[in-house]
Amino acid sequence: MAYNIKYFADFSQKGWDKEVQRLKEASYYHSWHWLCYASRMSGVISHNSFALYDEGELLAICPLAATDNGSGVRALSFGFGPLGAPALTSSHRSERRKTLDFIIQIYLEALEKNKAEKIIFARHPLNQDMLDCGRLDFKYCFELLRYQFFYLVENILAIDLTREEEDLVKEVGKYHYRHIKRTRKKGVAAKVFNSSENSKELDKRFSEFRQAHFAASGKKTRPDETWDIMHQCLREKKASLFAAFYDNEPISFLFAGEWNKMAFGWSQANLLEREKEFSPRHMLEWEAMLYYKKQGFEFYELGRMHYGAQPFYVSSPKEKSISVFKERYGGVLLPKITWTGYKNPKLQKYEVEALIGRYLKEDNIIKIPQS
């Protein structure tokens, strides 16, 4: 094979996304806007995502960036968040293995160049194939075992928007739906802001959302450039901002990303002084789902589910509480796989022992969770 590489920086937005759409394994983790956003995360020191070709024939899309945590540890990652795992085109097993060997060698060279010590990948289940054909393909889900990566499997909760609305309502928890109806009765109403809906108010409402996020967090959580990319997404039909209003004043915000036929909850903020009075989040996320259903989207992703400790991840009480909240919308569980591979054996030993140690301190006995 005569491999050649074309880097992310050499593409236009349209050109890059056109290539991404050709690969069944690609997800929003490979899209132009997501890569622009993720590459602006704190600590990212280089971004060299690339497309791989063989004599002009597309073989793969490969997110690639390096991050420095400021205290001497570097990883191929987006701010220590995962890179999308390489998305390859369909090919014979032997050809795929050769191509992936070549790709992993590029990552090994990037480790050396960036003086990094580990790689973090993730494979998202709502990929091109799932959205176009409804197939959840496990064929190559665990092929990175060949390269001595270890994995963490988590559940992604997604709402199947192709179902009838009355069926979606039946899946929502009884008390959860009661909260939604109660919030509506109190006079809270939802509005959407994007390039085609209420676009004249877009800048104002995004600014309010950003201020609410800062107030709820109590600090600046990420670089200004990431907010600029989110604002750009709103203007370029890659996201929508949902807001709950009471007396014509916003009391809750939900920012949702959009890719292909799926949308995903990206960022959320409530005005704290109104949160207990109205519980607006219940209604706002539900209204977002109904909006996307009407727009012809097939899935709305609510995010990761946390039930308790796993050997390589110990959920916080807040994460478990949020998961209970999400699960009350119903939906389906799909597997997301996060991979970690180490170059430095000392760092591997230190981090793995620390993770296992935390896991063993938790209550991991089989039990029925409280819902």
Image (cartoon, rainbow, N blue to C red):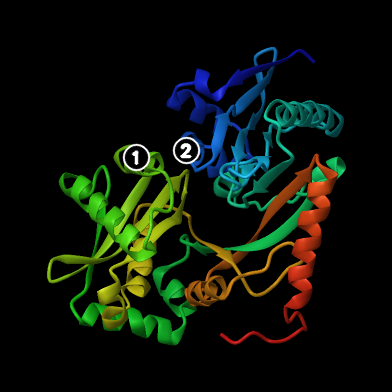
Q: CA distance from mark 2 to mark 1?
A: 10 Å
Q: Is residue 145 left or right of residue 132?
A: right
Question: Which of the two residues, 285 or 289, is positioned nearer the viewer here?
Answer: 285
Is the C terminus in the top left, top right, bottom left or bottom right quadrant?
A: bottom right
| Residue 63 visible | no
Residue topped by disc 1 = 228
Which residue is at the far front? 71
Tell me which corner region of the image, top left, top right, bottom left or bottom right, holds residue 235. top left
Q: Amino acid at mark 1?
A: Asp
Instruction: Please tell me whether residue 137 is drawn above or below residue 89 in the rendered image.
Output: below
| Residue 15 visible | yes
Tag 2 and tag 1, C-beta contact below 8 Å: yes
The location of residue 105, given as percent across then percent down, is: 79, 27
Instruction: Please tell me whether residue 126 is drawn above or below residue 177 in the rendered image.
Output: above
Specify few, some or many for label 1: CA neighbours under 10 Å numbering under 14, 14-19, or 20 or more: few
Instruction: Please tell me whether residue 272 is drawn above or below residue 253 in the rendered image.
Output: below
Tell me which corner region of the image, top left, top right, bottom left or bottom right, holds residue 208. bottom left
Q: Is residue 22 left or right of residue 15?
A: right
The local secondary structure at tag 2 comes to loop
Specify few, some or many for label 2: CA neighbours under 10 Å numbering under 14, 14-19, or 20 or more: many
Q: Is residue 196 left or right of residue 40?
A: left
The local secondary structure at tag 1 comes to helix
The location of residue 162, given as percent across then percent down, is: 47, 60
Q: Amino acid at mark 2?
A: Arg
Which residue is at the far left? 247
Image point 60% across, 44% down: which residue? 69
The location of residue 175, given as percent across then percent down, is: 42, 87
The location of residue 185, given as percent across then percent down, is: 22, 82
Q: Is residue 164 left or right of residue 212?
A: right
Is the N terminus in the top left, top right, bottom left or bottom right quadrant?
A: top right
Residue topped by disc 2 = 40
Of callouts 2 and 1, the N-terminal one: 2
